[in-house]
């Protein structure tokens, strides 16, 4: 039986949805990360299927909590982490007003409380067999297309993900998050989580968080929720 033939998906608490609790995730030593307890088995099945085709599917980023996502957000807001435009060109955070900084961050990094990585259902992958041991993945579209080292992985995922219950929520540009062919989601759980991540749940998490630009974010939250949370490729 394929992993997609799973029992009814779990419900999430508001704290789990927004990365402020870890009760839904477990360590997966074989994958080197934490994931939702019900997603670990299907991910291992996916990895074994890839291995049979000569692909060493490695998870490079799994569960990420609110605190970690906030550190990424605030670092970009202050200009301590790279800030990029839609074409991937560097931006000078000091030259941007608050609205422009928020917009630039949202292209490449989820708003804390709204990251799909909070759910433990979503993770980023590479093909370790396609690169030297000292290669440091950048997770760019160029790596996954054309002559990029992970182009074969990209093609393999397009063919096989659905069979194991997975999909890629950011494979096309829908005017929000920049395409991320490396981002994989376990549909039975992630679909439920997205349904539960209401505007009210997100508002509470952002309001209580220590985020730079928080007042601006809260003022725009309905638009951000629609454009950067709900606008995904369907499972």
Image (tube, grey):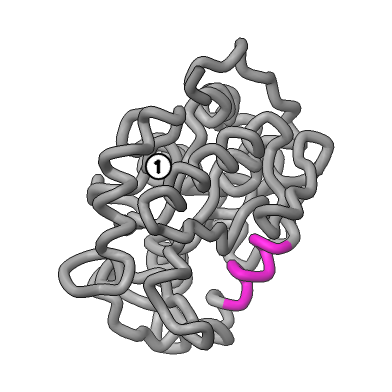
**Region in magenta:** 68-75
- Residue at 70 percent across and 53 percent down: it is 30
For this view, does 151 lie left or right of residue 214?
A: left
Q: Nearer the viewer, residue 184 or 77?
A: 184
| Quadrant assignment, res 139 | bottom left
Query: Where 137 sits versus 230, above or below?
Result: below
Q: Residue at x 61, y 70 (%)?
A: 72
Q: Which residue is mark 1?
A: 223
Can residue 203 be seen by looking at this rendering? Answer: no
Q: Position of residue 144 (x, y in %)?
A: 28, 65
Tell me the chief SS of the magenta region: helix
Q: Is residue 207 above or below residue 69?
A: above
Q: Toward the viewer: 126 or 190?
A: 126
Asked if residue 70 is among those painted magenta in the image, a careful observer would answer yes
Q: As rendered, which of 70 and 204 lies closer to the eye? A: 70
Q: Quadrant of the C terminus?
A: top left
Residue in the picture at 24% in, 48% down: 172
Where does the image place residue 48, in percent across and percent down from the top left? 51, 45
Q: Position of residue 46 (x, y in %)?
A: 49, 41
The 10 Å Cα crowd at callout 1, few under 14, some 14 to 19, many 20 or more, is few
Q: Secondary structure at mark 1?
A: helix
Q: How many marks?
A: 1
Where 176 sits versus 230, above or below? Answer: below
Q: What residue do we see at 44% from left, 34% from top?
A: 166
Q: Residue 39: where, in percent of width, then height?
A: 62, 34
Whether the magenta-drawn stretch holds residue 24 is answered as no
Q: Is residue 116 above or below residue 7?
A: below
Place residue 178 in its image quadrant: bottom left
């Amino acid at each position: 039986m394929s992993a997609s033939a799973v029992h009814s998906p779990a419900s999430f608490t508001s704290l789990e949805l927004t990365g402020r609790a870890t009760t839904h995730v477990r360590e997966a030593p074989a994958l080197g990360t934490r994931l939702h307890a019900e997603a670990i088995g299907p991910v291992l099945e996916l990895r074994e299927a890839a291995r049979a085709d000569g692909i060493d599917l490695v998870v490079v980023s799994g569960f990420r909590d609110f605190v970690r996502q906030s550190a990424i957000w605030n670092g970009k807001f202050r200009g301590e982490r790279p800030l990029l435009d839609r074409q991937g060109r560097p931006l000078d955070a000091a030259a941007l007003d608050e609205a422009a900084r928020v917009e630039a961050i949202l292209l490449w990094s989820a708003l804390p409380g709204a990251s799909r990585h909070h759910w433990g259902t979503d993770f980023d992958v590479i093909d370790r067999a396609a690169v030297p041991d000292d290669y440091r993945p950048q997770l760019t579209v160029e790596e996954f297309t054309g002559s990029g080292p992970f182009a074969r992985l990209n093609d393999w995922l397009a063919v096989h993900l659905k069979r194991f219950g997975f999909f890629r929520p950011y494979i096309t540009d829908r005017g929000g998050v920049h395409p991320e062919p490396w981002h994989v989601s376990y549909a039975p759980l992630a679909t439920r989580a997205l349904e539960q991540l209401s505007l009210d749940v997100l508002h509470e998490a952002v309001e209580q968080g220590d985020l730079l630009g928080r007042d601006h974010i809260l003022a725009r939250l309905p638009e951000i929720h629609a454009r950067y949370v709900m606008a995904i490729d369907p499972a």
